[in-house]
Image (cartoon, coloured by chain):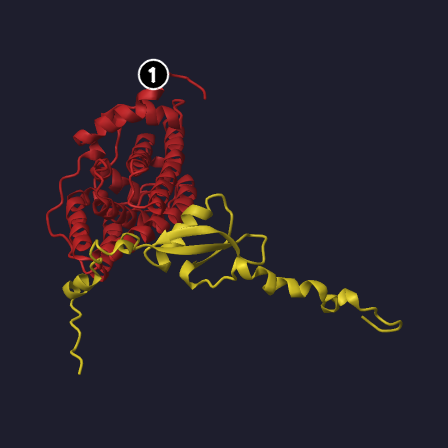
């Protein structure tokens, strides 16, 4: 049986309190975000670096201040670094080598018979 | 009172009005730049110095315009570096030195930007075409400055016990000098009648709405202390401005006419 949570501002502030210093990760209360920018002439967002911020909205502002000073872009994406799942360098061989000897996957492998409209 | 035609505005009035805007931007730009290497995080360091550069850009446009109005061949540099303290017309709010208290600075940036947004909005409809150009550019920057300050006021206010107290203290500390932003004197009245200047009372209305809305969302209290009498518009400044100008003007005065 749960109690009604106390949501007065003062109670919220208590709940917001940073953890005790014994927890060393508490010093890094700002999350790391990866920044992707699409340039004016580009079609896709490219990774340009990272920023620290308390939350996503401020990450967007920080990215704007840090990565678009010289008109680098017109659109910014930020994503918490922890949300990114990346392939491991150790698995590089098993992930990518098998595609190397399967040339039939490229359209150029095939001859177009005469008379066929492309 | 009948409207004044734009051509009847005497040049000194127009100069005085523009120099008030210019000095606010110039001095506040200098104060924000003092946060360089002192901000709580690297990202905030970049943000505050970017805002300082925005304000410096606005100051340059306004000082150049003031020099043109004055018609005595003074450039933006001459006006920035060679005027005496009593010839500056900035408000007292922007003179407070940077004292490493982030809550105070966010309160000042919040109060100031909540004033400059409606100010530039009003001036983008001024009968003075040069002010309209400057206003159109400055408004975009001011909106960003306000957004930045509001984000921090809300996060710090609606944060931990400590951040809440320090943000509230910031609001209280900067409150007394807010009144001067909306000072209505003979100059502002003449400029409003001529359709050139912004009406301080209207600006205050918008400002009140913005500020009380954000303060509520931040779970903070609107200060109730009385406003201090503002003397900056008359050239009577706080003790801080002298030190600021001594630092800012020193090199230029030491090497007059130097080229880099």
Query: Nearest the camera: B225 or B191?
Result: B225
Q: As drawn, which residue projects farthest toward the right?
A: A114
- Disc 1 sits on a residue from what chain? B
Q: Can you identify the residue that label 1 sits on?
A: B254
**On screen, B1 above or below B83?**
below
- Residue at the image point whose x is 39% and y is 41% from the top: B131
- Residue at the image point whose x is 30% and y is 26% from the top: B248
Question: Total number of numbered labels?
Answer: 1
Q: Residues within 10 Å of mark 1 (few under 14, many from 20)?
A: few
What letter labels the chain drawn in yellow? Answer: A
Q: As drawn, which residue projects farthest toward the bottom?
A: A1
Q: As drawn, which residue projects farthest toward the left?
A: B225
Q: Inspect this view and state whether residue B158 appears.
A: yes
**On screen, B23 above or below A55?**
above
Give percent across and percent down for residue B247. 28, 25
Query: Nearest the camera: A110 or B51?
Result: A110
- Residue at the image point whose x is 18% and y is 42% from the top: B177
Is B150 situated left or right of A20 in this image? Answer: right
Quadrant showing the N terminus of chain B: top left
**On screen, A24 above or below B217?**
above
- Callout 1 secondary element: helix
Drawn colour of chain B?
A: red
- Residue at the image point whose x is 15% and y is 53% from the top: B165
Give percent across and percent down for residue A32. 38, 55
Q: Inspect this view and state whether residue B206 appears.
A: no
Q: Quadrant of residue B32?
A: top left
Give percent across and percent down for residue B28. 29, 38
């Amino acid at each position: 049986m749960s109690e009604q949570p106390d949501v007065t501002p003062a109670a919220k502030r208590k709940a917001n309190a940073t953890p005790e210093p014994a927890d060393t990760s508490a010093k890094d209360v700002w999350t790391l975000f990866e920044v992707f920018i699409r340039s004016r002439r580009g079609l896709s967002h490219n990774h340009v670096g990272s920023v620290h911020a308390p939350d996503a909205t401020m990450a967007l502002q920080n990215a704007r201040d840090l990565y678009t000073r010289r008109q680098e872009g017109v659109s910014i994406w930020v994503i918490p670094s922890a949300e990114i799942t990346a392939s491991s360098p150790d698995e590089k061989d098993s992930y990518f080598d098998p595609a190397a000897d399967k040339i039939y996957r490229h359209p150029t492998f095939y001859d177009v018979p005469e008379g066929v409209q492309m | 009172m009948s409207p004044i035609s734009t051509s009847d505005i005497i040049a000194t009035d127009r100069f005085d009005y523009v120099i008030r805007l210019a000095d606010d931007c110039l001095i506040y730009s200098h104060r924000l730049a003092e946060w360089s290497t002192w901000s709580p995080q690297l990202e905030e360091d970049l943000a505050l110095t970017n805002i300082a550069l925005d304000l410096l850009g606005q100051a340059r446009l306004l000082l150049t315009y003031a020099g043109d109005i004055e018609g005595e061949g003074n450039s933006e540099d001459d006006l920035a570096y060679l005027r005496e303290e009593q010839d500056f017309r900035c408000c007292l709010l922007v003179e407070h030195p940077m004292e490493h208290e982030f809550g105070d600075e966010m309160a000042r940036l919040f109060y100031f930007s909540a004033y400059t947004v409606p100010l530039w909005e009003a001036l983008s409809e001024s009968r003075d075409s040069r002010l309209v150009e400057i206003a159109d550019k400055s408004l975009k920057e001011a909106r960003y400055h306000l957004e930045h300050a509001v984000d921090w006021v809300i996060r710090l206010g609606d944060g931990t016990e400590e951040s809440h107290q320090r943000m509230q203290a910031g609001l209280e500390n900067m409150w007394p000098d807010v009144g001067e932003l909306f000072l209505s004197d003979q100059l502002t009245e003449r400029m409003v009648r001529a359709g050139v200047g912004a009406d301080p009372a209207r600006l205050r209305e918008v400002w009140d709405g913005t500020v009380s809305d954000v303060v509520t969302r931040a779970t903070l209290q609107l200060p109730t202390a009385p406003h201090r009498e503002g003397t900056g518009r008359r050239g009577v400044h706080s003790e801080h401005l002298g030190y600021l100008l001594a630092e800012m003007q020193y090199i230029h005065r030491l090497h007059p006419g130097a080229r880099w």
